[in-house]
Image: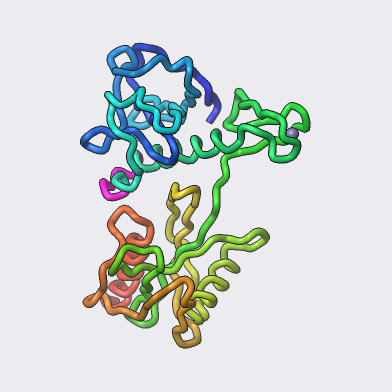
Amino acid sequence: MTKPYQRPSADEPAWWFICSAGELTLDNDDLPPHGRLQDLPMPELDDYQVVWLGELRERSCYLVVADLNDDAFSALGEFKSLRPLVAAQDEALFMMASRAKQVTEFLTTHRYCGRCGTRMQAVDWELAMQCHACQHRCYPRISPCIIVAIRKGDKILLARGERHRPGLYSVLAGFVEAGESLEQTLAREVMEEAGIEVKNLQYVCSQPWPFPNSLMMGFTAEWAAGDLHFDPFELEDGDWYSFDALPDIPLPGTIAHNLIQAVKAQIDRESSA
Ligand SMILES: [Zn+2]
């Protein structure tokens, strides 16, 4: 990110991420508007904060920070949650939409300095807000989380979270606390939520998750000791499941799904070896 406030030209085909209150303007196919500014039914952008986000399929992506309940963009689509984009499994589009949502959240919550209360200004060469009274500088907040798929023999631990949709079972996850390593977070969360110890951690992959600003860091691990005791404030139910009798699990496109598949691949490799 070297040119966050580069202005779009009227004849440059681009993607338009029009964001307000955590939602994005999406058309009937759940895509953000795409095309040349001069061809789109777009209001005058001088009144809006516009941020260059990067490129998607060789086109620039611009964030337009819309007002709450702003109807100036209604000819382009409706404000919708980003969740349909997860289900669509277009990873590059989802990641750009995540960025748009998180940058909007950052810009709209850092108008004033948290240290001295002065109005902040955007830094012109990086995505940051600066207070010129006390020099405090802020960057978009990213909240790291661990997410871990744990196996015991040829079974996997899946549990039902309080906030999950009915019937859904998933792997364990939790936020990194200040001063913790990922390994410490993982051991603490698994002990707190399920009452067990784990070993043989393997990093698998990560996924930004913009609800509101997580970075999910995904691992697999193996059971080491202890019986399952779920934290009733976090989890309603859970167990070790065989892969031939899995409950309803998270959709493809989610990191939880990828980690469950990673455990299955480990078990399949061992049984064919
Ligand atoms: Zn300040």
Render colour scheme: rainbow
Position of 129 compared to 199: left or right?
Answer: right
Number of marks drawn: 0
In the figure, 271 relative to 2: above or below?
below
Seen at 65% across and 59% down, the residue is 178
Q: Quadrant of ligand 1?
A: top right
Which quadrant of the view contains residue 266? bottom left
Quadrant in which the C terminus appears? bottom left
Residue 226 at what x, y percent from top left? 49, 87
From this view, report whether residue 65 is shown above or below residue 207: above
In the rendered image of this protein, does residue 53 appear above or below residue 240? above
The reply, left or right, for residue 143 in relation to residue 236 is right
Asked if the magenta segment contains residue 211, the reply would be no
What residue is rendered at 32% in x and 74% in y?
267
Query: What percent of the width, then of the height, locates residue 98?
Result: 42, 42
Q: Which residue of the protein is positioned furthest toward the right in this rendering?
A: 134
Residue 153, image x, y percentages = 36, 82
At a point 37% along the width and 36% down the height, the residue shown is 24
Task: Name the spot of residue 232 as percent of width and height, x first.
Answer: 46, 77
Type of secondary structure dominating the magenta stretch? helix
The residue nearer to you, when weighing 44 against 71, is 71
Q: Quadrant of residue 118?
A: top right
State the residue at coordinates (78%, 32%).
134
Residue 19 as seen in the image, left or right of residue 77: right
Nearer to us in this view, 82 or 200: 82
In this rendering, the answer to whether 200 lies above or below 122 is: below
For the record, the magenta segment spans 86-92
Q: In this orientation, which residue lies closer to the viewer: 169 or 3?
A: 169
Q: Quadrant of residue 20?
A: top left
